[in-house]
Amino acid sequence: MTLFNELQNLMIKYRFRPKRKLSQNFVVNEALVQKLVELADLKKSDNVLEIGPGTGFLSRELLKHCPVVAVEFDKILCGLLEQELNQKQLTLICNDFLKAKLPKFNKVVSLPPYSQSSLIMLKMFLLDFNLAVLVFQKEFTEKLLAQPGFDQYSAVSVLTQYAFDLEPGKIVSPACFFPRPKEESRVILLKSKKLSPAVSDREGFALFVKTIFRFRNKNLKNALEKSRQFLLPSFKVSEQEFEKRSASLPISEEKVCFLEVEDFAEAFNQLFA
């Protein structure tokens, strides 16, 4: 039986249809599922996180290799997963991934909901794992890979590139999903790397980068001036000290959108360390 036929049977059995508001595009291509598992190079000692397992086609293959933590928001699909994947190796969390408290894991293999791509990547920046094999819309992967000065360069570009080595993979046809998304997708690998220069407060650094990028076309000096009201309440730095440290930044005249990834870390350390 093909995955598409299996999906049809599950939709009849559990009485559901894909929900557009939840970006539910279910994988129906066996080769893609196998490729994701292969890229993850799973061992029995691994613990894998899957974000938005949906009907469990990928989960089922992952469970053949190691324990899986699956986080699913849709209550109907949670019931489906409990029935269809009744295994001790599976930890099913029925919650919003962005709010869920997660057990330990060292790898991520997932086809996350596209509408939540940026928020998912911003949360993953704060998590501790070695490798992620993900499928996003092709346009979003270009944003993750974007370099300074390009239109796609953004806060999520900076944070992702700061924490991970990125490796773009194969293009994925819309025909691999039901319903078909409008655009092509792409596999991307994220490998955790040593943070350089290191920041002691990842959450604070993420807030700093996201806030500064609200003023991407201003120079850093002006962006900091406009950001102070959003940043200072979160850090133990007085306004006077903030002004002093901002004035001494050697890159203060550079536009935010032209700053290198390392520049953001160095500026954060000088301002708030």
Image (cartoon, helix red, strand yellow):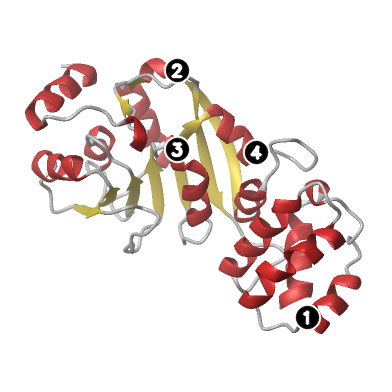
Mark 3 residue type: Ser
How far separated are the C-alphas under marks 2 and 4? 20 Å
Q: Residues within 10 Å of mark 4 (few under 14, many from 20)?
A: many
- In the rendered structure, which disc, 2 or 4, sits on the residue that comes first in sequence? 4
Q: CA distance from mark 4 to mark 3?
A: 18 Å
Amino acid type, label 1:
Glu
Q: Is residue 41 visible?
A: no
Q: Which of label 1 and label 4 is nearer to you?
A: 1
Q: Are marks 4 and 3 in contact (CB under 8 Å)?
A: no
Residue denoted by label 2 = 173
Q: Nearer the viewer, residue 55 or 240?
A: 240
Residue at 39% over, 34% down: 36
Residue 107's x, y, as percent? 40, 51
Nearer to us: label 3 or label 2: 3
Look at 27% across and 47% down and name the residue there.
72
Q: Residue at x 7, y 28 (%)?
A: 13
Q: Are marks 1 and 4 in contact (CB under 8 Å)?
A: no
Q: Which residue is mark 4?
A: 145
Q: Tell me which numbered mark, 1 or 3, is placed earlier along the sequence.
A: 3
Q: Which is more foreground, mark 1 or mark 2?
A: 1
Q: Which residue is mark 1?
A: 239
Classify 119 as above or below 230. above
Which is more foreground, mark 1 or mark 3?
A: 1
Please state, as top left, top right, bottom left or bottom right, where the C terminus lies in the image.
bottom right
Structural crowding at the residue carrying mark 2, measured as other residues with C-alpha within 10 Å and reported as few (<14), some (14–19) or many (≥20): some
